Amino acid sequence: MEGLFFERDFLNKLESMGFLLKKAMTGRYSGQHRSPRKGQSVEFADYRPYSSGDDWRQVDWNAYARLDRLFIKLFMEEQDLCVHLLVDTSGSMEWGEGAKLKMARELAGALGYLALVNMEQVGAAALSDNMSGFLPLQRGKAGITRLWSYLGQLHPGGATDLNLALRKTGRFIRRPGITVLLSDLMSPAGYQEGLKYLQHLGQQVVVLHIMSAAEKSPELLGNYRLVDCENQEFREVSITPMLLEAYRKQVEGFVEGITGFCGSREITYLSVAAEDKLEDILLHSLRSIGVLV
């Protein structure tokens, strides 16, 4: 089984980083992110009046001395974060000899590593029409090898209805957290309803939109038979400079539409080129948009 591999120096840089949450999450284990539940930790949150049966150790005796009333100290729990990594494995991700899927797998592997070494929980799923399997939530460094092995064996092929595939993730996304979608978003049925569904599941959604430079601005002129890599339909076309310019405008409109939709839904969006350097994306781009710190 194929796996992922990262240089030790790169992993050392990742270990100094962490995910940035926009709001408190409810977790199950002790971790590094604030939960909306009040529990027992070092960060004071509030007071409430004492009730029969409360733990006397939580009484604020200084407040009692001042006010002659019993109050219980409440603290903000520190909780683990669930990170769900969704990788589009449709045929269009094979463009450029698989460069887009390679970037998606490596980004997911690096983000998963970052979460796992920080004692967060990480799960992953390959988005396809059958959604035949997924990696359940892992926790701790022992989960790194399982995550990398799972991601390493993903291969592109066939068509994927992103809206349908994203709805099927409800089978394994059971807790609030961060969901990262790694996709070219090239789904004839669209992607909007699927992203809304992720938010319905209580997820902070991050879209890493992966395209190749050749997709955005192809260097083609002449007569070609273009074959759809997902359904194998083909069309004979004569590519002229005017047609190329019209195509580029269509791509710009496609990206602008995604950017506008994500902005309107408070979904974090980043356009990623398959040719970009992984380290630059992780250490700079994702920091600049507030995903990592």
Image (cartoon, rainbow, N blue to C red):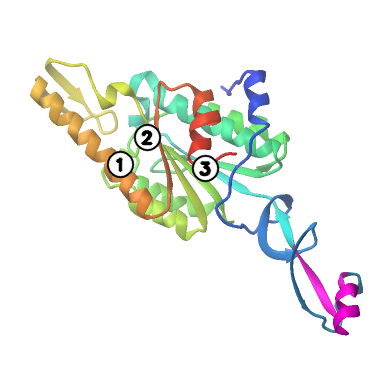
Instruction: Please state which of the two labelled residues, at mark 3 or mark 2, is closer to the viewer.
Output: 3
Give the x, y percent position of residue 84: 55, 45
Taking depth in this image into account, of 219 and 283 the one nearest to the observer is: 283
Residue at left 24%, top 23%?
217
Query: Element under label 1?
Result: loop
* Residue under label 1: 187
Instruction: Please state which of the two labelled residues, at mark 1 or mark 3, is closer to the viewer.
Output: 3
Give residue 290's mark. 3
Q: Is residue 232 left or right of residue 201?
A: left
Taking depth in this image into account, of 223 and 216 the one nearest to the observer is: 216
- Gap between marks 1 and 3 measured at Cα: 27 Å
- Gap between marks 2 and 1 measured at Cα: 9 Å
Residue at left 23%, top 20%?
218
Please state which amino acid type lies under the numbered disc 3: Gly
Dot placed on the residue nearer the N-terminal end, 2 or 1: 2
Taking depth in this image into account, of 86 and 6 the one nearest to the observer is: 6
Q: Is residue 215 left or right of residue 10?
A: left
Give the quarter of the figure containing the N terminus: top right
In which quarter of the view is residue 69 placed? Answer: bottom right
210 is higher (above) or lower (below) than 165: above
Dots 1, 3 in contact, CB < 8 A: no
* Residue under label 2: 90
